[in-house]
Image (spheres, rainbow, N blue to C red):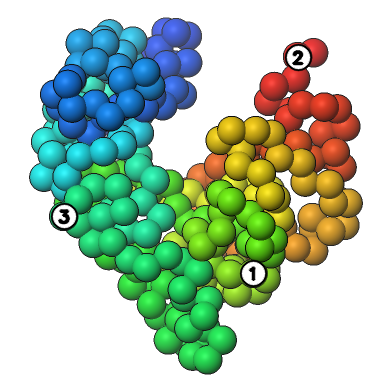
Amino acid sequence: MKTGLPDINSLSLAQQVAQMVLVRASGYRGDRQRRYPEWEPPAASLQHLVTDMGVGGVILVGGSGAEIALRCQQLQDWANIPLLIAADIEEGVGQRFAGATWFPPPMALSAVARKQPSAARDYARQMGAFTAREAIALGLNWILAPVVDVNNNPSNPVINVRAFGENPEEVSILSSAFIQGTKSYPVLTTAKHFPGHGDTDVDSHLHLPILPHSEARLVEIELPPFQSAIASGVDAVMTAHLLIPAWDGKNLPPYLMLS
């Protein structure tokens, strides 16, 4: 893997913009193995994006742990600037890549916390540490976790057991412990899905959920786990595909509005 970063001032505007782009790709190296070819470019296109266009990162989906290690090395060999390589590994690396450790969903830790809070915190720290250690061993350096949504809507089809609990306190404590567990390893973490996707009953991959609460309610319920995650040193925050009338004031999320 290449080391060292160029002086940002030596990059053209196009190169600087490209460094802000993360593209999705298959964890498999063979084009015929791609599970979602509509969303995952073939090898030649992916190499062009990495080498010639200079994208800043890749998010990987599919493949075994061994295949991911080879894929990560291939991607870094293609890159002129070291890549961020990410994956949605909320339940451990094995959730996405066969052969690695796959933990129970985070919601299981909230059940433990109600009877053994200190044990649950320790389990969350260990979960973070194991996830980070396995990620780095395979070449992944950006964990798109933890989920810090408060899942207080039993009809939620997309967050559900991915959350660490049903109230802000337990989510804050356990997700922060997860983040702290990763800190011994050179890996990035991500708090998601800002400002909180827990109290919805629509899958945001398919439709646009509405979070109709007042700003005061958001401050009381949805936002505290993000504040705790930031205080614990989380490296990134992922925004949700949500409409929040209290903030947006229109009929589209802010990032879809045109001035």
x and y percentages locating residue 82 in the rendered image: 26, 29
x and y percentages locating residue 52 in the rendered image: 27, 8
User: Mark 1, mark 2: which one is toward the viewer?
Assistant: 1
Asked if the residue at tag 3 contacts the one at tag 1, i.e. Cβ–Cβ closer than 8 Å, the answer is: no
- Disc on the earlier residue, 1 or 3: 3
Camera-side residue of 170 and 107: 107
As drawn, the label of residue 182 is none
Describe residue 189's horizontal placement relative to residue 192 as left or right. left
Q: Which residue is the site of mark 3?
A: 99
Amino acid under label 1? Glu
> Can I make out residue 41 in this image?
yes
As drawn, the label of residue 258 is 2
Q: Quadrant of the N terminus?
A: top left
As drawn, the label of residue 166 is 1
Please give the name of the residue rendered at 64% of the width and 69% of the height, measured from the top-left corner.
Answer: 166
Please give the name of the residue rendered at 56% of the width and 45% of the height, measured from the top-left corner.
Answer: 237
Q: Quadrant of residue 125?
A: bottom left
Amino acid under label 2? Leu
Q: Under tag 2, what secondary structure?
A: loop
Q: Is residue 138 above or below residue 48?
A: below
Asked if the residue at tag 2 contacts the one at tag 1, i.e. Cβ–Cβ closer than 8 Å, the answer is: no
Residues at marks 1 and 3, CA–CA distance in whole angstroms: 31 Å
Q: Under tag 1, what secondary structure?
A: loop
User: Mark 3, mark 2: which one is toward the viewer?
Assistant: 3
Q: Quadrant of residue 170?
A: bottom right
Near mark 3 (Cα within 10 A), the count class, few <14, some 14-19 or many ≥20, is: few
> Can I make out residue 56 in this image?
no
